[in-house]
Structure formats: C-alpha cells, structure tokens
Image (cartoon, rainbow, N blue to C red):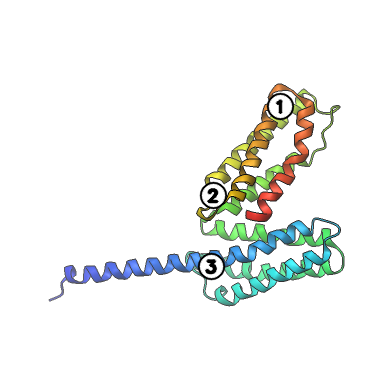
Amino acid sequence: MFSFKKILPVFLMFVMVSSIGFAGDLANFHNKLDEAYAPYRMSLSLTNKKDKQEAAIKTMNAFTKKWAALSSTYLNNPPAPYNESPLWKSTITKTSEVMKEGLTLVKAGKLKAGHKTIEAIRGMLGKLRKSVSIRNFSDYVNTYHTEMEHLVGVKYSKQNLNAKAIIKLREKVAVLRFLMNEAKAATPKKYSENATFQKFLNGNIKLLQLLHQSLEKGDKNKVLAILPKIKPAYGKLFIKFG
C-alpha cells in the first residue's frame, strides 16, 4: 500500500538538493559574469580617454576572451531563473557583437565612438537581470551613474549659480544621496570588509554630503569646488567594484 509518509522525506531531500544545485549554478554564473565584467569596466574607462588606445584594446580583448568562455558554458544552458528570460540568448550573443564592434572602432583610433558603442552592454545586462527580477550592486551603481550625468552635464559658474540653480542642484543632490545610500545597502558580502571598497564608497557619500551642506549654506565657492570631484569619485568606485 502506498504511504505518503514514507516517500515524503525522500521528496523533501530531492527538493532540497535540487534547490542547492540551482543556487550553485546561479552563483557560478554570477562569478563568471563578474570576472568578465571587470575588464569591461576598465574598457569603458580607457575608451573615455584620448591616449589609451593600446590599453583599451588589451582590456577589450580580455573581456572578449572571458565572455566567449561564459557563452560556451551558459548560452544553451542558462541557470535558473535566467532560463525563464526571453532576453537570455539575444543578450549573451549581442554582447559579443557589441564588444566586437567597439573593438573595431578603437583599433581604428575612434575611442570615443568605441566607448559609446560598448556602453550599451551594461544596459543590456541590466535589462536581462530585470527580466528575472534580479538586481545587484552594478544595477544600483548604474542607476546612480545615469542621474549623476544630469548633474555633471551642466557647467556651473558664479554667474549662473543663482538661487534657482541652487534649488535645482539641491534636488539633484538629494536624489544622488538617496541612490548612493541604496547602493551601500546593496553592498555584496565579498566587498563588505574590503578597505578599498569602503574608502571609495564612503568617499562618494561624504562628497555628496559636503555638496549638500554647501548648497544649504549657499556657499558658491565650495559648491563650484566640489562639483568637478563628483564624477572622478564615482569613476573610482565603478572601475574597481561597479
């Protein structure tokens, strides 16, 4: 006679082992993704500079090699929950194509165009994660980057930093402070005790706090002195850990 009580422990053990296996596969994939993403971040930084063609080509080739290995392992065998995403295959293959296109431009000396081309990769990976309700530290950093560009994209001076401009700046800085604190809350365990990470992260937070305080006081000189430091501070965090 069939006994559910007898089979229940076996069933639960199967579920537990399967869950551990799925989690392990996902963790392994994310580790491989992080390994490839490191030279990608450096490629973004180097292609944003005029005299770094050779160095950029080197890091772009490093990314291409690591991405090819990742694709070989996972393209037709995505870990859960990515196996449920309609964006999976197109993102993995398109990433390779975009980097190839960017590399061709950089080899031709067109670093600015190459930078703009490969910048699309982080957006594609972000959309892939979003399609399966995954959000990691990179996504928080990327959201901050988007808003930060709205701030640093405006050229301020003593002449145009009037009361109205200060109000708008205060609003933008408030958003950036919120987003950077969100990123801090999403700090990966592997970075939580990393002294360099903490230095770069807290450096951004402190800089935004000083900018906020200077705006509150209406201290134009300090505001104008701090603004040019915002993007470089973010860049240090992104290149190493974003």
Q: Amino acid at mark 1?
A: Leu
Real-space Cα separation, disc 3 to disc 2, in angstroms:
19 Å
Query: Whole-percent x and y of residue 122?
Result: 66, 58
Task: Check disc 3 and give the amino acid type.
Answer: Phe
At a point 80% along the width and 56% down the height, the residue shown is 48
Above or below, 151 against 63 in this view is above
Identity of the amino acid at label 2? Thr
Instruction: Classify mark 1: helix, strand or loop.
Output: helix
Q: CA distance from mark 1 to mark 2?
A: 28 Å
- N-terminal-most mark, 3 or 2: 3
Which residue is under mark 1? 215
Q: What residue appears at the point 76 percent right and 25 percent down from the top-left corner? A: 164
Mark 2 secondary-structure assignment: loop
Q: Can you give x and y, in whole percent of width and height, for residue 231 in the image?
A: 73, 44
Q: Which mark is residue 29?
A: 3
Residue 242 in sight here: no
Viewer-nearest residue: 211 or 100: 211
Q: Which mark is residue 187?
A: 2
Q: Image quadrant for the C terminus?
A: bottom right
Q: Which sits earlier in the primary sequence, circle 3 or circle 1?
A: 3
28 to the left or right of 225:
left
**Could you tell me if the residues under marks 3 and 1 are in contact, i.e. CB atoms within 8 Å?**
no
